[in-house]
Each structure stands twice: as structure tokens, then as C-alpha cells.
Amino acid sequence: MTPRLLYAGGTIGAAGTPLSPMPGPDFAARFERDLRPHLPAPVREVTLEWLPRPLDSAAMTPRDWLDLARTMATEGKEPLVLLHGTDTLAWTAAALAMLLQCYDPVGGVTARLPRRIVLTGSQYPAFDRSGLAEDSDGPANILGALADAAEGAGLSVFFAGASYQATRVVKTTCTGLDAFAMPNGPGRITPRPDADAAEIAAHLAAIDPYFGKRPLLAILATPGGAIAGQIEAALTAAVPPAGIHLLGFGTGNLPKEPGLPDLLSTCRDRGIPVVLTSQCLHGRLAPGTYTAGDWLADCGVLSMGDRSPASVQVKLHLTQALSTLNGWDVEIRDAFLLSNIAGEDPAA
């Protein structure tokens, strides 16, 4: 079955000064004129479609993830290659992996959309004024992603000749062609029954009123930073956060600022999950190793191991939606956050 292409925007279709994604019809015209004739015969007849409003991926929101998931669940069954900007590609990949599943009332995964979906993009625009841009990685990534989409199952990211699992991928360079990596290796994918489009559509409709409606607070620990002040401001905001993501030092260390333990405990009491990852790209958290991290668990902070920041933040949004929909208590909520639902935990 020949894969389909879906253009969502991003650098691969960018033009002008400063760069901005071309509208879908303009990208399609350039694709037909400059790229399709160079495609190998097996994929030369690939169908190209586009979103009504292509975006620079830096402008993507959780609501856009939900819309993309609806599109991919209900419009066709062929393998799909999503052309997407690189800035937030890892977030969209993780979101689609988690959204294109069905869940029971306590967060267990009951079924998964069987469609093969591959995300790709480029570090440099695919086209210039005269045709294909000679220095662009876009055409090669499209060809590679089309080949990748014809094999295997599930969601992945294809970039610079390599395929990565959707919930484990991280963008590691903003200029190099090998933009993505899996610093902590592959994740543990659990086989699930197939879900049909109607089941996924019903799941997405159920969480729609709650998904992405509350902000997330991500706090990067810095020497002399004021973590307590940021959390205090969030707790007094008109709309409380769906969750707080702490990015600590090393194996999961944070300065124990005056008042911070009480604020973290208040978050727990108010039903706002607080999770911890490391600022380091590689390695697994061990927050009890040092005194500087040993106090966090007593305040209800959950250690996310070696999960990618993108997968952690997407899961906080999903947790907020499912928790509100199903009336979860803290125990069910925390168990869901710590569970492996879409390969976000390491394979071994």
C-alpha cells in the first residue's frame, strides 16, 4: 500500500525572508514541479495532502495535536508520512503515539490505532527559487520516510537516514542534518489490540473538553534560580497548571529553597502533579543518590526515569484530560503517569 504525504508546515516547506511555511497549495505546486519527477517509481504516485493552516512547529499547541490525531484516525488507512517542523516534532510524535490509543477508566491501554505513521521534516527548506535546494535535507528525508512508512507498525520519526521511536526521540542540534537522536535508547513497546477509527474518534471526543485546556509549567533548575517563586505564582493563577515539570541537575537534584517543600506538597494536595527529569540528555534519574534530591519524593514529586521531556509533557496533558474525565484520585493519577503506555520507558 503506497503511503500518503501530509504537509503540516515547517522548514521543509518554508520560503521567504524571514522563513515561513508555504501555504499547502503552494507547497503542492512546488512538489509537483520540482520533486515528484525525481521520486523513484515505487512511490512516484504518492498522494500529497496538506493541512488547511500549515504552521511553523514552534506555534504548535496541544489542541493542534488533538486535531492531527483526529485527521490520522479518520481520514484513510494507508501508511502516512507527516511533514512537520523540527522544533516541536518530538512533542507531536509523542502526542500522536499517546492519543491514537483507547484507555479504560483507570488509564489502561485497551487498543491502539494500527496505522503506520512516520514523521519527518528538514533542517533546511526543500525548495529555492529555481527548484530543489541543493543543500536541503528535505528530499532525502521524504524518500527515507516513505520507505520507512512501508515497513513495520506504529509511530516513528525518520530523519537523516535513521528511524526513531516516537516517545523516545529528542532534537539534539538546531543546525546539523542529524537533528534527532534517542540518547537513552529504544523504548518498551507493548502489543495492543487494534482499534478502529470509530473507537479512536470516540476517545478523542471524550477528552476534547479537557485536553490542552490548562497550561503546563516547566521549570529549568539554575544556580540561584527561584523555583519556589514560579510555583507560588502558578498556584495563585486564575487557571492552575495541568502539571509542573521540574528539570533538575544531574541524577535529579534541586536546591531545597526555603518554602519549596511546602509548595510542592500543596501541589500534591491540590491535585497538580509534579514530575522530575534531568537536564542531561543521557542517563536515568536516581534522585535519592544525593541529599540534594533525596527530599523530593517526600513532597510527592514523581521521578520520570530517563523519559524524554517531550513525552513527559505530553503525558501530563493527557493525564489532566483522563483524570478529569474519569474522576481519578491521586493514586490512580500517579500510577498512570508512572506507567509505560506508548514506549516512553526504556526497553530494558
Image: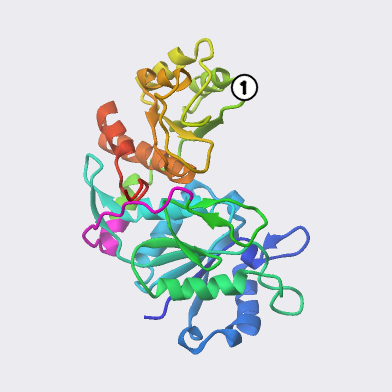
**Residue segment shown in magenta:** 183-201
Instruction: Please tell me in which quadrant of the rendered image residue 317 appears.
Output: top left
Which residue is situated farthest in the right direction here? Answer: 17
Residue at the top extreme of this rendering: 258
How far across and how far down the image is residue 275, in percent? 42, 31
Q: In the depicted view, which residue is nearer to us: 76 or 80?
A: 80
Q: Quadrant of residue 298?
A: top left
Instruction: Say whether residue 153 is magenta.
Output: no
User: Where does the image place residue 340, in percent across and percent down from the top left?
Assistant: 30, 45
- At horizontal 56% and vertical 66% (from top left) the residue drawn is 160
Secondary element under disc 1, as helix, strand or loop, is loop
- The kind of residue tagged 1 is Gly
Label 1: few (<14), some or many (≥20) within 10 Å?
few
Location of residue 164 with respect to 103 vertically, above or below: below
Question: Horizontal placement of 329 versus 293: left or right?
Answer: left
Q: Determine whether 22 is above or below 280 in the image.
A: below
Count of marks placed on residues: 1
Q: Is residue 107 above or below residue 143?
A: above
State the residue at coordinates (66%, 71%).
Answer: 126
Q: Position of residue 70 (x, y in %)?
A: 39, 59
Image quarter hosting the N terminus: bottom left
Q: For mark 1, what is the residue?
A: 225
Q: Is residue 190 magenta?
A: yes
Residue at x-position 42% and y-position 71%: 149
